[in-house]
Image (cartoon, rainbow, N blue to C red):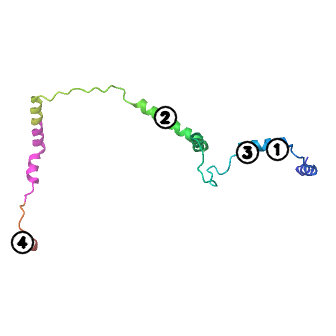
Amino acid sequence: MKPDDFEDKLQCQALRKIPGEWRSEILREGQRVAVPNDKWGAGTASLPKLNWRTALSEIFWPNQKAWAGLAAVWIFIFALHFSMRDKTPMVAEKISPPSPEMVAELKQQKLMFAELIGANDLKVADRQKILSPKPRSERAEILMT
């Protein structure tokens, strides 16, 4: 049977009325299930009455796979963080101050190192002469000459 033949056959048949009880039941069910296109009620003056479950559902429903992937990545990051954590107990050790012999030895090593690199010679050579401030009239003469 060709599609055109089927359409011709349907056009020849008379339309029957839907029984009244069916019609009211169908309309009631349709109104119960119907979701308006404007979810936020732009035509009404009051704010929409959404509970928190429907609000969260509207946020998460379109991108369930994306949210699930993001949650999996975060779980992986937390697992990796906790597995890499150092599990050795942190014990504060009491450190005794260095002995006087150790302090003397360190000072002697510091002096010997300074002599080896010649740090004393550099300090004297690098010093700049400190100029005392002079009266302004003398400064002008220095600048002019």
Image: 130 above or below 73: below
Q: In the image, which disc is placed on residue 88? A: none
Which is more toward the observer, 21 or 90? 21
Q: Mark 2 vs mark 1: which is more N-terminal? A: 1
Q: Amino acid at mark 3?
A: Gln
| Residues in magenta, as a range | 109-130
Residue 46 point in image, percent of width and height: 60, 51
Residue 113 in magenta stretch? yes
Q: Nearer the viewer, mark 4 or mark 1?
A: 1
Indicate which disc residue 137 carries.
4
Marks 2 and 1, how far apart in space?
55 Å
Is 78 situated above or below 17? Answer: above
Image quarter for residue 25? top right
**Mark 3 crowdedness (10 Å alpha carbons): few <14, some 14-19, many ≥20:** few
Q: Classify mark 3: helix, strand or loop.
A: helix
Which residue is at 45% across, 33% downward?
80
User: Which secondary structure class fits the magenta region best?
Assistant: helix
Residue at the image position 9 percent from the left and 42 percent from the top:
115
The location of residue 40, given as percent across then percent down, is 61, 50
Q: Nearer the viewer, residue 13 or 4?
A: 13
Between 116 and 3, the residue placed more toward the observer is: 3
Residue type, mark 1 in image: Arg
Q: Which residue is mark 1?
A: 23
What type is the residue that disc 2 sits on? Phe
Q: How many marks?
A: 4
Q: Secondary structure at mark 4?
A: helix
* Mark 1 and mark 3: Cα distance apart in space: 12 Å
Q: Which residue is mark 2?
A: 76
Left or right of 93? Residue 142 is left
